Amino acid sequence: MQKALVFNLQKFSIHDGAGIRTDVFFQGCNLRCKWCANPESQPMEPLPGESAKAYTVDELVEELLKDKPFYDESGGGVTLTGGEALLHPEFVLELTQALHREGVHVAVETAACVSEDVFARVLAAVDFAYIDLKHYDDTKHREGTGVGNELILRNIAAALKGKTPVVVRIPVIPGYNDSEANFEGFAKTLTALGAKDVQLLPFHQLGESKYRRLNLDYAYDGTKQLHDGDVSAFAAALTRAGLNVQIGG
Ligand code: SF4
């Protein structure tokens, strides 16, 4: 029976989809965002001193169903995230089917940097998707995350043509994409792709202490957090282009 490594199960989450949810954080990511708040999630195996639990689908479903009364009461469910949940596609598909059999709503949060085939299969299976776009410009995307955005943009375009509701999430990162000119660029790219709903996530420092604990270099050490008001001009630029914008998760 297949297993997947999960480095955190966050119960009672209210920031990653409708209602009360459990966030499942899968180990492993194929991006290396310089501002990542979960650096421990990036390698496919936990770093020395860190832990992740290997679950079978049945074990994970059993754990997730413990909070089903809260999902039912609040219109919530389960959100699959990471790391990059889509690096475990067969597990994610089996888990989604099992949760659906139990009447649980399943959302995914992904950076969309996986093959178009994998992406399409997972997107068609889940009930809702948050898809991250860190930068509309390929060179800047590569600079901030270690990978270009060509495949990501193709996957976003395909998702927006599908039946699963999609919200594009943009992390607003100081000195990287936090200017009105950049958000004019995002607006142009997103409207051309057919996006409707966008969420802006102001940069936070919840991951700062992890870099110290793990003895890792952190490009944003000491950088000030952004607040909702700091990104309102960027939200306005997207709104002017006809997009529905929400600030914060
Ligand atoms: S995609 Fe998310 S988990 Fe992966 S490196 Fe970027 S911020 Fe971290």
Image (cartoon, rainbow, N blue to C red):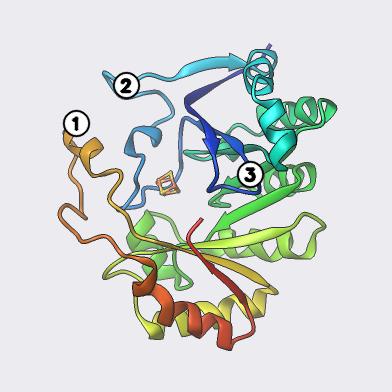
Indicate whether 80 appears above or below 143. above
Residue type, mark 1 in image: Arg
Please report whichever mark, 2 or 1, sits nearer to the chain's N-terminal start.
2
Mark 2 vs mark 3: which is more N-terminal?
2
Residue 97 screen position, x and y as percent: 79, 30
As drawn, 114 above or below 199: above
Q: Secondary structure at mark 3?
A: strand
Dividing the picture into quadrants, the one containing residue 160 is bottom right
| Helix, strand or loop for disc 2 | loop
How far apart are labels 2 and 3 at the CA level? 24 Å
Q: As rendered, which of 31 and 98 lies closer to the eye?
A: 98
The location of residue 21, given as percent across then percent down, is 61, 37
Q: Pointer 2: what residue?
A: 50
Graded by Cα atoms within 10 Å as few (under 14), some (14 to 19) or many (20 or more), the crowding at tag 2 reads few
The picture places residue 27, in percent across and down from the top left corner, at 47, 30
Q: Quadrant of residue 206?
A: top left
- State the residue at coordinates (46%, 39%): 29
